[in-house]
Amino acid sequence: ETGVTQSPTHLIKTRGQQVTLRCSSQSGHNTVSWYQQALGQGPQFIFQYYREEENGRGNFPPRFSGLQFPNYSSELNVNALELDDSALYLCASSLVRGVVDNEQFFGPGTRLTVL
Amino acid sequence: GESVGLHLPTLSVQEGDNSIINCAYSNSASDYFIWYKQESGKGPQFIIDIRSNMDKRQGQRVTVLLNKTVKHLSLQIAATQPGDSAVYFCAENSSGATNKLIFGTGTLLAVQP
């Protein structure tokens, strides 16, 4: 186990609804990244937070937003859910921002199903 | 655009055999690569990494080879065990302030007892 926890484990929503996913980073890690993993595919980078500020974003629309709190835990919010948002959402924490060989530790993910 | 890996193939091996999983990457400027193992219902788990100034790196039962000329990465697993059954992803870590990971689609390794 990596020490990164995510909640909830599973979630079912309907189109147009909003969802909030949560992540607690490994102790001492100040950087949190979020990834979306569609079934049968590799994870895709959504965005990263470092010390409560967004620190880079992938090719995702603005309805994907996030927060990081002073204790470095993080939330991923998705508004106006679409069917294609159904995926496993992964959170990864790391210790140091910007170091290329900085290992990222993944949580177990939240499985989101949009009906 | 950037991409790493292939469409999800499946590799079936007998227990005790050696496994070789391959990956192609497209960003020649990348300088760090990682192999992850993902079991059903779990997040990716770090296996081994390699920097672009190396050709080979060995761990316990695993070896990663990097060929920058053809932008190819491979993972070798010695004496494959049933517990090695999982999806394996190669990932590329871009430099800069945001060290995001770029994943391929993975390879499913099925170990037959």
Image: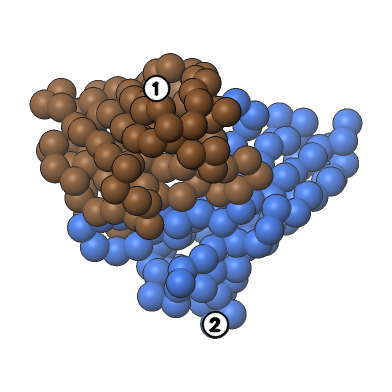
Which chain is drawn using blue? Answer: B
Q: Which residue type does callout 1 highlight? A: Gln
Picture coordinates of residue A3, whole percent (x, y): 37, 22
Q: Which residue type does callout 2 highlight? A: Thr
Q: Please rate how many residues cluster around mark 1, counting C-alpha atoms within 10 Å: few if below 14, some from 14 to 19, many from 20.
A: many
- Residue B101: assigned label: none
Q: Is residue B87 above or below residue B101?
A: above
Q: Secondary structure at mark 1?
A: strand
Q: Which residue is mark 2?
A: B69
Task: Spot the residue most to the bottom.
Answer: B69
Q: Secondary structure at mark 2?
A: loop
Picture coordinates of residue B2, whole percent (x, y): 46, 68
Q: Work out whether residue A57 can be spotted.
A: yes
Picture coordinates of residue B87, whole percent (x, y): 66, 42
Q: Work out whether residue A35 or residue A12 is closer to the camera in this orientation and state it.
A: A12
Of the chain colours in the picture, the one used for chain A is: brown
Left or right relative to B48: residue B15:
right
Residue drawn at x 88%, y 31% as measured from the top left: B113
Left or right relative to A5: residue A66:
left
Q: Is residue B77 above or below residue A68?
A: below
Residue B54 picture quarter: bottom left
Query: Chain letter of disc 1?
Result: A
Q: Which residue is mark 1?
A: A6
Q: Work out whether residue A88 or residue B24 is closer to the camera in this orientation and state it.
A: A88
